[in-house]
Image (cartoon, grey):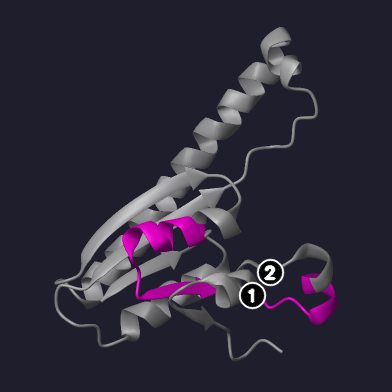
Amino acid sequence: MKIVLAIDGSDFSKLAVKELAKLPLQNESEVCIINVYEHPAISTPSLITSTSSINSYYKEFLSNAEKIGKKIVSEAGKILKEKNSSLRITTNVVSGLPKKEILEKAESFDADLIVVGSQGQGAFSRLLLGSVSQYLATHAKCSVMIVKDKDTK
């Protein structure tokens, strides 16, 4: 079985890691753990090249986002390996739109399952902000497991 586990370090994604670790997966199952971070919004691209302080902020942001992402996927990989040492785990930290990047990774990885945490948003929030898990559930070519905290109402 090939699984994409998409996490962002939130409590909801930590719960997704724990739930995936509980599943009785086949030996040699493959798990690709992905973390997607978004670039800060910059209104004028020419500002980056002309203003050194903005350019250094931008580079520092990307560097920090990459470091944090690597830590998040590494910790998740350790948790999964502790529960099932036969898992083959790969990790990816990428920048972009989470919906798009997760879906593209699932397709290129030929995933059988995508696992994500629910952010627990209400219907109004989902309408305004959109929901990564909802998008994946309706657009993915494979099954999607959306992990919810049963104690959250």
Name above or below for residue 146 compared with residue 75: below
Q: Position of residue 105 (x, y in %)?
A: 42, 57
Q: Which residue is mark 2?
A: 131
Q: Which element carries disc 1, helix, strand or loop? A: helix
Q: Is residue 88 left or right of residue 108?
A: left
Q: Is residue 123 left or right of residue 145?
A: right
Q: 142 or 53: nearer the eye?
A: 142
Three-letter amino acid code of the residue under disc 2: Ser
Is residue 118 visible in this depiction of the protein?
no
Q: Position of residue 57 (x, y in %)?
A: 65, 24
Q: Which residues are magenta?
A: 102-126
Image quarter hosting the N terminus = bottom left
Is residue 31 visible in this depiction of the protein?
yes
Residue 129 belongs to the span the image colors magenta: no
Name above or below for residue 144 compared with residue 105: below
Mark 1 near mark 2, Cβ–Cβ under 8 Å?
yes
Going 75% across and 30% down the picture, which residue do you hit? 42
Name above or below for residue 91 compared with residue 42: below
Q: Position of residue 84 (x, y in %)?
A: 20, 76
Q: Which element carries disc 2, helix, strand or loop? A: loop
Three-letter amino acid code of the residue under disc 1: Gln
Going 33% across and 53% down the picture, which residue do you hit? 91
Question: On residue 134, which mark appears?
Answer: 1
Name above or below for residue 109 compared with residue 36: below
